Image (cartoon, helix red, strand yellow):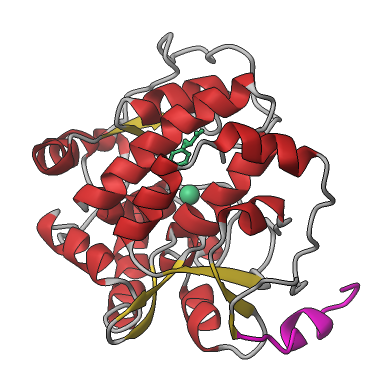
Amino acid sequence: MADDTHVLDRPPPGAAADWTIPQGWDAYTPQEHATWDTLFARQAKLLPGRASDAWLRGLDVLQLSRPGIPDFEELSDKLERLTGWRVIAVPGLVPDDVFFDHMANRRFVAGNFIRRPDQLDYLQEPDVFHDVFGHVPMLADPVFADYLAAYGRGGQRALGLDALKYLGRLYWYTVEFGLIREPEGMRIYGSGIVSSYSETRFALDDPSPNRIMLDLKRVMRTEYRIDDFQQNYFVIPSFDELLRLTVETDFAPLYEELKGKPDIPVAEIVDGDEVLTRGTQDYARGKVGA
Ligand code: PHE
Ligand code: FE
């Protein structure tokens, strides 16, 4: 995650100076490949009609439906021809400047490990299923590919402006948990959703969360949960519009303005919100301690 702080300050043994490690594809066990296949089969059934057209096309052109955990080199060769991006393996979380440098240069950092069979439904750290199945199809879309590279440059800038907290929220509510309005209806494109069996349905169909049209400043003020379903999803009208808005806006004055304003709690609706569905928040209320 772009805003995580509990990372090492130098590459661990076995990692290169840029923090990359070999994927070690040959070392995956049949069991690990089978875990990928199980996760893949569940999501592939659920996603037509729910995932955005761009994500579905990416899955198809990258031939991700072939059995087993993808080989990053082979996948990267296909992806690079489409949008210039490659997928590289790293040992878990990397420092922010390293993360942004790779991203600005169209290198997508991915975990190479896969979750255990008893963690099919949930795990907090991003594994190869989340990173590759969730993120990489979107990188085959030329507009989204440009957005993420621009985000990487924006991250480098935000580091210097001490504003990562704000920019990180934009990543969270677009790249990880974004919804898009398509001609046929609302669709998901955020990788945290498309790689999750339960959140795929929750994000689109559950009455509990708010679904609000994305506004830059609003999103950058909004807190988020890393350990549960979201209580707000932000909706974009199109990837073209997301790219245009983020690239054409100078974030420096926004950061300055936001530093003087309070954060917005996760489930709150504020003045100016274009609310598409106002959530009941029943899901959050039903939980112990919520
Ligand atoms: N325009 C942003 C800035 O001025 C950079 C950015 C581009 C951020 C695209 C996110 C996505 O910092
Ligand atoms: Fe992710």
Answer with left or right where residue 216 lies relative to residue 29.
right
Say if residue 129 shows up in the picture: no
- Name the spot of residue 255 as percent of width and height, x first: 67, 37
Q: Quadrant of residue 184?
A: bottom left
Most frequent secondary structure within the magenta stretch? loop
Q: Quadrant of the N terminus?
A: top right
Answer with left or right where residue 204 lies relative to residue 131.
right
Q: Which residues are magenta?
A: 277-290
Q: Say if 118 sits above or below 98 in the image.
A: below
Q: Nearer the viewer, residue 254 or 76?
A: 254
Q: Residue at x 37, y 60 (%)?
A: 35
Say if residue 10 shows up in the picture: yes
Q: Residue at x 56, y 50 (%)?
A: 170
Residue 91 belongs to magenta span: no
- Name the spot of residue 194 as percent of width and height, x first: 41, 67
Give the residue at the far right of this rendering. 289
- Name the spot of residue 246 as percent of width and height, x first: 44, 46
Q: Say if 7 sits above or below 78 in the image.
A: above
